[in-house]
Amino acid sequence: MNSYEIAKKAALGALNKKATDVLIMDLKKVSTMTDYFVICSGDVDVQVKAIADEIRRELKKDVRPWHVEGYQNLTWVLMDYVDVVVHVFQKEIRDYYNLEKLWGDAPVERITDEAGESIPATK
């Protein structure tokens, strides 16, 4: 499974738990840190946990996270799969850190529904 397939599977897992504003950022040309960010939002801590748990469940057959943090307060869970880093935020925390702007040079793909359809995002 390549890094894009991992990112897409993580994004679809997030949608399974009704995550909002799900996107995949392609960082290959702007950073050597990772290939992709998957970023999504949940409304409250319980939903953030459900989203993160679903993503881990979906990916565990193919890849295990190298590092996970944020399960203590559940405002932001980060799951590092080396080539893919997943960020599950509560909306206000996502707005505060604004990774989309910080990594604004990266191409972005918005994942829009359970069928996994995507549309290019505008910057």
Image: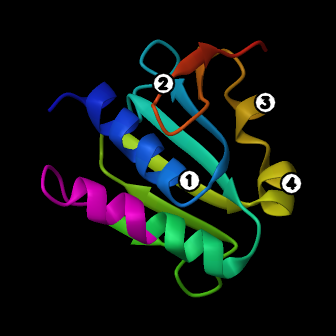
Q: Earlier in the sequence, mark 4 or mark 1?
A: 1
Residue denoted by label 4:
96
115 sits left or right of 40 in the view = left
> Is 27 within the magenta?
no
Residues tagged 2 and 3 counted as in contact (Cβ below 8 A): no
**Looking at the image, which residue is at 40% across and 64% down?**
54
The local crowd at label 2, few if under 14, some if 14 to 19, many if 20 or more residues have their Cα within 10 Å, is: few
Q: Earlier in the sequence, mark 3 or mark 1?
A: 1
Q: Residue at x 57, y 35 (%)?
A: 113
**Disc 3 residue crowd, few under 14, some 14–19, many 20+, Cα 10 Å:** few
Residue 47 position by quadrant: bottom right
Question: Distance from label 4 to label 2 (Cα)?
Answer: 22 Å
Query: Disc 3 or disc 1, which is closer to the eye?
Result: 1
Q: Is residue 76 above or below residue 15?
A: below
* Residue 110: % across, % down: 62, 26
Q: Would you name the residue on which mark 1 appears? A: 87
Q: Is residue 1 left or right of residue 4?
A: left
State how many labels appear: 4
Cα gap from disc 2 to disc 1, whole angstroms: 17 Å
Report the magenta residues as a range.
53-66
Q: Which mark is residue 31?
A: 2
Three-letter code, disc 4: Tyr
Q: Which residue is mark 3?
A: 101
Q: Amino acid at mark 2?
A: Ser
CA distance separating discs 4 and 1? 13 Å
Q: Earlier in the sequence, mark 4 or mark 3?
A: 4
